Image (cartoon, rainbow, N blue to C red):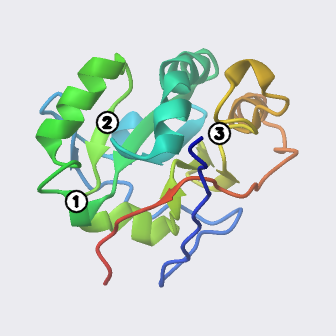
Amino acid sequence: MLLLTATVVVAGGPHLKIGDKAAHTDVKMTDISGKEYSLADLKGENGLAVIFSCNTCPFVLEWEKRYNELKEWGEKHGVGIAVLNSNYQNRNGSESLEEMKKHAQEKGYQVPYLVDDESLIANAFGGQTTPHVFLFDKNFELVYKGAIDDNYGDQSAVKHHYLKDAIQSVSNGGIVATAETKPMGCSIKRKLN
């Protein structure tokens, strides 16, 4: 039996706190489609969820099965979704743009999957793991950060839909009841400044 353990690595630099504004929202990033988008381009009328992700982490391989559903949920509530690959140290191998394209095609991604070049966004936000979610409201203020939900391995056993609930709250103009949870996943193989 393979035991998976959560890795939480606290990187140097800033860590966004609830209420902080997003940085680098106009920086263009290359998507698997070949187009370039900024976070501002992908934000819906009510906000944007940024998910730090990758091609290889066992936690991502389970949670990514929910990405398309989250995109639909976000669209229903006026919230955009952006999936970012910040694994700079593996950029010439398993986390290259070509491998991202292959992975997304195999998994049927319908979400924007972007290269966070030199881990700029991950370092600015304080992204720790793959996956790690940061949900911003319409003013690009952080309203939730943490895990997608409380059960990466079994979607049918999820009791707390942290991101979905937060998206619904932000779309209603309400306060997110659970504003922060502990991220679970593999450490981001970032470029350190």
Check disc 1 and report the residue beneath it: 90
Quadrant showing the C terminus: bottom left
Q: Quadrant of the N terminus?
A: top right
| Amino acid type, mark 1 | Asn
If you read the primary sequence from the N terminus, does the residue marked by circle 2 or circle 3 appear first? 2
Mark 2: few/some/many CA within 10 Å (<14, 14-19, 20+): many
Q: Is mark 2 in CB contact (under 8 Å) with mark 3?
A: no
**Secondary element at tag 3:** loop
Question: Mark 3 sits on what residue?
Answer: 148
- In the image, what residue occupies the spot 41% across and 71% down? 123
Residue on which disc 2 sits:
113
Residue 11 x %, y %: 49, 78
Label 3 crowd bin: few (<14), some (14–19), many (20+), radius 10 Å: many
- Callout 1: 10 Å neighbours few (<14), some, many (20+)? few
Q: Position of residue 74 (x, y in %)?
A: 58, 24
Residue positioned most to the front: 1
| Quarter location, residue 34 | top left
From mark 2 to mark 3, how far is it between C-alphas? 17 Å
Q: CA distance from mark 1 to mark 2?
A: 16 Å
How many marks overall?
Answer: 3
Q: Is residue 52 above or below residue 10?
A: above
Q: Which residue is more in the foreground, 111 or 42? A: 111
Foreground mark, 1 or 3? 1
Marks 1 and 2, the one that precedes in the sequence: 1
Which is nearer the N-term, disc 1 or disc 3? 1
Q: Which mark is residue 8?
A: none
Which type of secondary structure does the marked residue at label 1 adopt?
helix
